Amino acid sequence: MLETLLMQTPPLAPLLPTFGLGEFGSAELLFGALLLMLVSSILTMLHKNSKIHLIVSTIALFLIIASCAYLFTLTNPGPGALPTPLIIYGVFIISPFSAFFIALFAAAILLVNIMSYRYSSDYNSFSLLLAFAAIGAMSVAMANSVVMILLGIELVTLPTAFMIMMNGKQYIEPAVKLFIISAIGVTMLTFAIALVFPFDSQLMLSPLVPNSSVSGNYLVVLALVLFIAGLSFDASLFPFNLWVPDVYAGSPANITAFLAGVNKKVAFVALFQILFILMLPYLPTFALIFQVFSILTMFFGNIAAMVQENVKRLFAYSAISQAGYIAIGFATASAYAISASMYQIVAHTFMIIGTFAIVLWLENKNIKSIEDYSGISTKNPFAAIALSVFMLSMIGVPPLMGFVGKFLLFTGAINKGLIFLTVLAIINSFISVYYYAKLIIAMFAKKEKAHVPSSFTINIVVWACLIIIIMFGIYPQPLISITNAAANALLGVTPIGILTH
Amino acid sequence: MLSLFVIIPLIAAALACLIPRTERVAKYLALSGSIVSLLLAYLLLSNPPGTQSLQWFNVAGLSVTITTATAQANLLLLMLVAIVTPLVFTYSMGYMELPSEQRRFYFEMCVFAASMMLFAISASFITLFIAWEILGITSYLLIGFWHYKERAPTAARKAITTILIGDIFMLMGIVIIGVTHAGFDYSLLLSNPITSSTQLALVFILIAAFTKSAQFPFHEWLSDAMEGPTPVSSFLHSSTMVKAGVFLVMVLLPVYSAAGLLPLILVIGIISAILGASNALTERHFKKILAYSTIEDLGLMFIALGLNAVFAAMILFFVQTFYKAALFMSAGSIIRANNEEEDIYKLCCSRNSKPILATALIGALSIAGIFPLSGFLGKSFVESSAMSSNIVVYAVLVLVGLATSIYAFRWLFIPTRNVFDKKLTGKLGYGSVPKTMVIPGVVLAALVVVATFIYYADPSYIGGAAQMQLLGATEIAITNIVAIAGIAVAFYIYKLGHRMHLASTNSMAFAALHNSTIVNGAYLIFAAGIAKIGALAGNLDFAFDRSIYVMSQLFIKSGYYMRRMVDGQTNSYALAFVLGFALMLLLIAFNLIT
């Protein structure tokens, strides 16, 4: 059935390239793997054997990553050339951009899935919800229409709320908060789409109406504001992020890892697509907005984190400040900075998932506050060292991945002349050292005899994150060229030459 | 990039030494690692000369590459290090006895050897700097290896301080080159015209080379570095690490020549050679004599470079490795037999010491420049290149050569005067010197001889054929006559015992010759001046610290206010949406106005 679907010529897409089976078989592999994940989740719901489910979904996610790697090379035209995206049925577009982010989400969800295996009250239903959320996240990454983005965001957020809720009574409150806030966000998005509709009835992700007068078009400006507001709540940009510490700290740590590692990144991907494709004519406007937002977000996250005692809450604030760094890419708005922003997204995804894996494991041992963390270095040296590495990477210490991301972001901002923004961002890095170091000192200052055994699944996740962070920190060039290709593919859809390096 | 595989066995050995409870096998791990590295280096010899580069990262128009080269000079240094490493590790098997220090020692030695090999094949300033810094750090760690000894930590600190001065200059030079050339490869420097900023960078790099290679005025750390274990002295501080500076200048010599900096190199080389020789004549510490001799050797190499005689410098560079390592190994054995006694007048020899003394003799003959040993080759090439270009330099070289043969045989004769009496002194004696300490020295002495004969048999195996010039009879005659005269003087004074010292210890002549005390005094004055500036900067730092503290309190206070925003009420979160909305509209209005 899938084949016949793919074989059909979509009526809405005149850009569609010839879509033969043999040549683009990997696109089917991608969709097949997505389907496999979903079907296996549903089937194992009935079967109640969670181990089989873990194996099948892991295989499916690996298949997704592999097919994305293939699709990336297939659609990547190389430097200087125009990208050759595949447009599937008018609603999905597979370009280096989408392949890159689908692979990233698949990797992140894989890690979240593995770490949740032992620490979830009902793993089967959890992973079914996770599979839905995964499909939502991936459909945002490969969306070719604004409506698809809206649906994708909804498909990510709703299962997340249920994932939080199903863990017990005390989790109903954060779940409902997330639900309400996301409802507001989705409403705003819908309004925005409605405002765009008169100008672009196709709602495709293509640059908005070059023929309509850009400067005087206040309805579209209002749509821009609504888009940013509707997505910033999930991207946790100030002042739309006040719910973040509350919900992040209130949820179980594996779902916090999902929230910070995938949910937030999905919002950023949607922002990339809407702002740099649809709203490209308004680039100076949203760049200014993001300059202010990134500064406010960094200061809010870092300063509030300084006074936190609960480790999960501390990392929630830290994730907010990292979102501020990622937003620098939007504020700078050059191809280089977008690529840097993508790099930082990858870095933060793995840093925060690794961190929350450790937090999850310790929280189950009832170790929650900074005071509880003292002496971890002797209780379990690996956890202490790994957590320190993640935190050092968040500070931006070479040779870790966070350093490279920040370095790219800052050089991009400096090249664009945003010296003030860069100075404030560096001051924020200083501030962040305070609370990260507080935790590191707490972990290593005291010596305790008791040994806390580590968990196998957690160890896998932490090792994977550690290897990625150290490897791409020491040798960043492969990932930089991938993000460059993704950024070029994002901007390549737009024929306008506004964005020059 | 294939050439980087050479260092992997050593890195693996170093990492293996980190595993707990490997005290007993650490030495074998290190030795096997070094032998595998030697084999890989040998395989690399057949590589065609050329450079390979790997992009590390390329951001904002600055391309940072890891570049390795397999030119003749690179392979020469690589082979030297690869050959000496297993010999030194064998020597260490006998020398380092305590099990508790095995892992640390071999870890540091393996890391050192690996970084030296990385240095040998590096062709970009990035790789160079990485290797350079690891060399400095391992040198520091190994000099202060016996940190419980009285003077070892001081010596290590002195070495690292001097070397770090050079490192800072090196970094400045590299940054200047990176900014002006948009890259760090040597080839960029070699292909672009010399500007004044490049010239400045080259001077900075030269200073770094002088600190690493212990040249005036940075030379005194090397004699103090003899506080380290003897394998370290014979490996780092005579045959490999200290030659890094010479090697760097040798590789960049065309640039230095184009920048007109050769006279500077020449002058510093001459001063260092004279200082090294004069101090070696009067020093009493057995190993320090050799250290000063190393300073002199390095000075000679810089003289050759200053005369733009790459070939002569390369020959000396090559042959010096073997005889100096052999001399240090025999020195270590003699010191071991004498219960770690290091005063040359208190050392004794005995019947058992013959292989050690033979090693020492070959080394001493070589360093004095007796035909046909390889030291002679290096020395006479330098002298002949001086003779053809600058007669004053030649005169200095002959004088230094005379001093060299005197101190070399002073070093050898004085211990042999005293016959070892075991019962009387209660010393360990030569019987206690393990075989593993004797054999590497013998092998090195054999290499001194072999290297010589290979050279005579096939002169083209080292250096390009175009640069080949077999030496004339005059140079051979002069060098040998001077050397023999020196040996005769040494024999007369020290062996026959006509006088104990060249000059009495409180005479003016002694003060002039033994000028290390003066140099050390100058260091102290310089350090005191720096310390004054440091105290000033400390006050500034205190003020800075206070301001940071005040600011951090401000931030923490505002943090308490800020966390109140997150009050757990969903309606206030929704209110924030409205505020954000208003903020965005304000910004858009602002954007429209401006």
Image: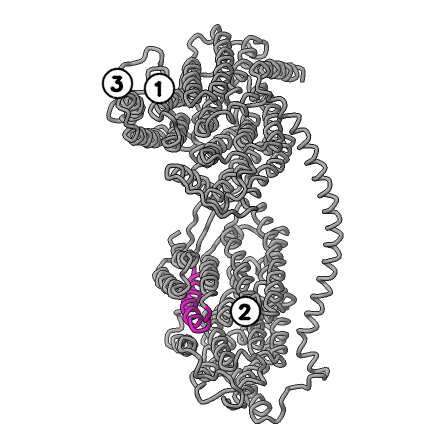
Q: Residues within 10 Å of mark 1 (few under 14, many from 20)?
A: many
Q: Is residue A277 visible?
A: no
Looking at marks 3 and 1 on the same chain, the residue that comes earlier in the sequence is marked by 3
Magenta part, dominant SS: helix
Give the quadrant of the C terminus of chain B. top right
Q: Residue at x 50, y 45 (%)?
A: A377
Judge by depth and name the residue closer to the eye, B36 or B27: B27
The residue tagged 3 is: A2
Q: CA distance from mark 1 to mark 2?
A: 69 Å
| Amino acid tagged 1 | Ile
The residues tagged by marks 3 and 2 sit, at their Cα atoms, a distance apart of 74 Å
- Mark 1, residue position: A87
User: Looking at the image, is mark 3 or mark 2 nearer the viewer?
Assistant: 2
- Give, as a three-letter code, the residue at label 2: Gly
Asked whether the residues under marks 3 and 2 belong to the same chain, the reply is: no
Residue nearest the observer in this picture, A50 or B253: A50
Q: Secondary structure at mark 3?
A: helix
Q: Is residue A12 above or below residue B82?
A: above
Q: Is residue B131 visible?
A: yes
In the rendered image, residue B83 lying in the magenta stretch gets the answer: yes
Q: Which residues are magenta?
A: B71-98
In x, y percent, where is residue B460?
Answer: 39, 70
